[in-house]
Amino acid sequence: MLWALVAMFLGGCTVKPAPAKKNTAGQPYDVVVVCAEDVWRGDLSYALCDLLEEPLPGLTRPQGHFNIVKHVTPERASNIDKMYPNLVVVSVNPAVSKTSYALSKNLYARPQSVITLTAPTVASAIEFVEANAATLREELERGERNNSNNYYAQNPATLLMADFEEHMGVEMLIPANFFKATTREKELLWYIRDYPSRAQYIFAFRMPCDPLLGQDMQALSALGALDTMFSTISSKGADGSYMRISSEPQSMHITYDVEINGRRWTEMRGWWEVAHDFMGGPFVAYANVDVDKQETLVIAFGLYAPEDPQRNLLKELEHLIYTVK
C-alpha cells in the first residue's frame, strides 16, 4: 500500500533515526516531492506547485518561493534524492481519520527540512494543501532562514555590527566581507558586499514619525524617506545619476504587521534603479514604528545581480532582519 511505501521511504516511524552527518545536495530553496505516481498526477501536483513555486513578489525577474527539482515515487527515491535541503512527502492512508502534517529536521542530511503530509484521500490532501499553503511554506522558509543565519553567525562582521548598533540602537547580524560605504547623508548606513558580477547592499537609518498616522501613511512615509536616502547615492559611471525607488507600479508589494521577535514591521518589496544609468534590482525594506520614541527604524536590503538568479541572494539578506534585537 502507498502509506507503507512512504513509511519505508522514511525508514519506519518507530525508530528514531541517528542525526545525519552528510551535507545536503542541491541549492537552498530546492525541493524534492515524494509521493506515488497516481497521487502526484492531477490536481495535487497543481496544488503543490502553487504552494512552492508561487512567484516571490518584488523580484525583477520572476522566480518562485521554492524550486521543485523533481517528483519521485517512494520506491524510486535514491540516496541523492533524500539529501536535498527540502523534502515534501505525501502519504495517502485510508486508515487515518483526518489530514495532518509533521515536520522533521536533518533526517538524511543537514541542514534539511522534511514535511510529511498524511491524508485519508487524495482529495483531502489537496484541500489541506490549498487551505494551509502559507503555513506549510513558512515551515520550509523558517528552515532556510535559520540555516542561513546560523551559517553567517559563524563569521560575523563584528566591527560593522558595533557600528550598526551605535547608529540604530539595535543589534543585527552582519555577515563577513561587507564593508562600509561613504554616503553624503550622515543618517544613512550603507554596507556593501561586492562580487565580480553582483553586489549586495544593507541600508539603515532612523527617522522621526507621527505614531498617530495609519499604517498606510507610515509605509508611504518610510518609502519616501528611503527614496530620499537613495537619492544621495550616485553611480560612478554616469554624470547626474542617482539611486531611486522605481515608479513601476507592479514592482511594489507591502505587507503590514509582520511580527519578528516581538516587533511589528511593515515589509516593503520593490525595485530600485539608477537614474541616467542602467543599474537596478530588487530591494526589501522593513519599517518598525517606536511609539515611545516617536521614531521609525528602517532597514533595507538591496541586490544588484543582472545575470544571476535573484531569490537566494536577496533572501540571505532579508533573513538578517530576524536577528534584530
Image (spheres, rainbow, N blue to C red):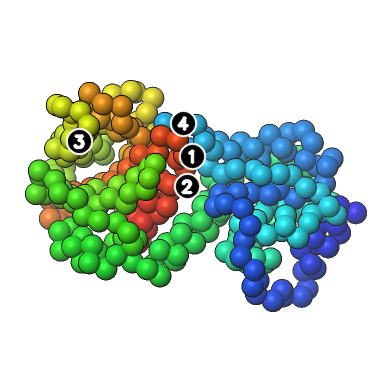
Choose mark 2 or mark 3, whichever is in front.
3
Label 3 element class: loop
Say the numbered circle drawn on residue 61: 4
- Mark 3–mark 4 CB contact (< 8 Å): no
Q: Which residue is mark 3?
A: 236
Residue type of the residue flagged with mark 1: Pro
Residue positioned 19% across, 50% down in the render = 181
User: Which numbered disc, 4 or 2, marks the residue that appears first in the sequence?
Assistant: 4
Choose mark 3 or mark 4, whichever is in front.
3
Alpha carbon distance from label 4 to label 2? 13 Å
Q: Which residue is mark 2?
A: 312
Q: Nearer the viewer, residue 1 or 184?
A: 184
Alpha carbon distance from label 2 to label 3? 27 Å
Q: Is residue 68 left or right of residue 242?
A: right
In the picture, which quadrant includes the C terminus? Answer: bottom left
The image shows residue 55 at horizontal and vertical percentages of 52, 34
**The quarter of the displayed image where residue 15 is located:** bottom right
Label 2 element class: helix
Q: Is residue 212 left or right of residue 282?
A: left
Decide if residue 199 is in sight here.
Answer: yes
- Mark 1–mark 4 CB contact (< 8 Å): yes
Label 1 element class: loop
User: Which numbered disc, 3 or 4, marks the residue that appears first in the sequence?
Assistant: 4
The image shows residue 255 at horizontal and vertical percentages of 37, 40
Residue type of the residue flagged with mark 3: Lys
Q: Which residue is mark 1?
A: 309
User: Which numbered disc, 1 or 3, marks the residue that appears first in the sequence?
Assistant: 3
User: Which numbered disc, 1 or 4, marks the residue that appears first in the sequence?
Assistant: 4
- Mark 2–mark 3 CB contact (< 8 Å): no
Mark 2 crowdedness (10 Å alpha carbons): few <14, some 14-19, many ≥20: some
